[in-house]
Image: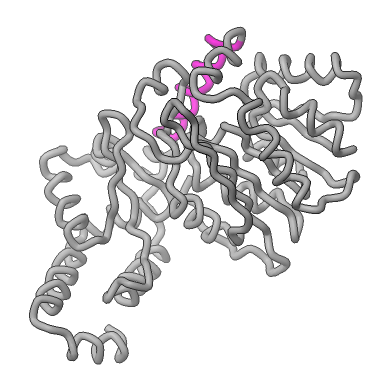
Amino acid sequence: MSAAALRATQAQPPELLDQLAGLHKAMADHLRLQILRLLKNESFGVLELCRILDIRQSALSHHLKILATSHLVSTRREGNSIFYRRAFLGDEDSYREIKKEVFETIDDLPLPNTQLKKMKQIQLERSQQSLQFFERNADKFREKQGLIVEHSHYANSLHDLIDGLGLPADAWVLEVGPGEGQLLVELAAKFKHLTALDNSRDMLDKSRAAISAAGYKYVQFILGDTVVARGENLKVDLIIFDMVLHHIASTAGTFLDAAALLRSGGFLLIVDLSTHAQDWVRESCGDLWLGFDDDELDNWAMKAGLEAGQSSYLGLRNGFQIQMRVFKKTKIETKKMLSDT
């Protein structure tokens, strides 16, 4: 414990000292430290953690309860499943510095290859689940998307946000998951350098057809994900995920990829749903995640070296809320990070 933290605890009432004792007890366990290490960047469900750690669910639940009680992990419900992630360390946390020191220490430890392989397998399964949905529903994409929101419902606000970034016409823009190409065509009218990236061949063909029908010839199309785009040595000024992030298996890894693809001073624009409880979208729309909280996006961005900027929110009559969030890559070089993805 640092000297500052020790002095702080000496002035605390007995109940806070009890909390401190409980915190140290929660961290004084090899398996619980492993769990915290696994949750460095990603969130996992209970059954997924059981697979990675090769442990029974009853035993794992006991340890997760202890970690949650000490505010070392947080939970979120995704339909019938509970996902765990590391708790975000706020300034109001009396033991923030202690937790931060522990997190930084365990983050320097390498993960066993067996655990890394299982994590990658889980992310692969998530990705395949999403890809298979789009392969089955390529001809019904707009209909499926329309169950949640139509592009026209937020298009004006989105373009106001894009125009407000002040990018010149010769800026390079990357849209990830362009779907049927509706936004892509609108972007082609604004920018001279445009790349479309999609891991579904069918959806990429649809966006290519939309661009061709609109008479634009300078759009580049890449089949794959952000990892593939990094392999292409692509460098862009703006990356847009328009109602796509909730389909992506590794959201934290995607922020890291985006930071690597952006030039200094470039922008990442996320358009997605705020956290909701409408589980029917999993089956009907192929969603992996039920929206995102502000602090989740902010945390992933911060870890990727991106600064939060403008934001806009739009409530819909069906109970969903659209959030448009801008993150900027500062001129300071992004810190090298171990993504474990």
Residue 111: x and y, percent? 38, 53
Residue 233: x and y, percent? 76, 45
**Which residue corresponds to the image point at 17% horizontal and 67% vertical from the top-left?**
28
- Observer able to see residue 125: no
**Which residue corresponds to the image point at 82% horizontal and 50% vertical from the top-left?**
167
Q: Nearer the viewer, residue 165 or 59?
A: 165
| Residue 175 sits above or below residue 66 on the image | above
**Which residue corresponds to the image point at 28% horizontal and 55% vertical from the top-left?**
73
User: From which residue to which does the magenta span run?
Assistant: 121-138
Residue 152 shown left or right of residue 15 in the figure? right
**Which residue corresponds to the image point at 60% horizontal and 12% vertical from the top-left?**
138
| Residue 153 sits above or below residue 231 on the image | above
**How many marks do you count on the picture?**
0
Image quadrant where residue 21 sits: bottom left
- Quarter of the image where the N terminus is located: bottom left
Q: Nearer the viewer, residue 105 or 288?
A: 288
Q: Main secondary structure of the magenta part?
A: helix
Residue 52: x and y, percent? 30, 41
Residue 333: x and y, percent? 68, 66
| Residue 59 sits above or below residue 138 on the image | below
- Observer able to see residue 42: yes
Q: Confirm whether the magenta stretch covers residue 274.
A: no
Image quadrant where residue 153 sits: top right
Residue 290 shown left or right of residue 311 in the figure? left
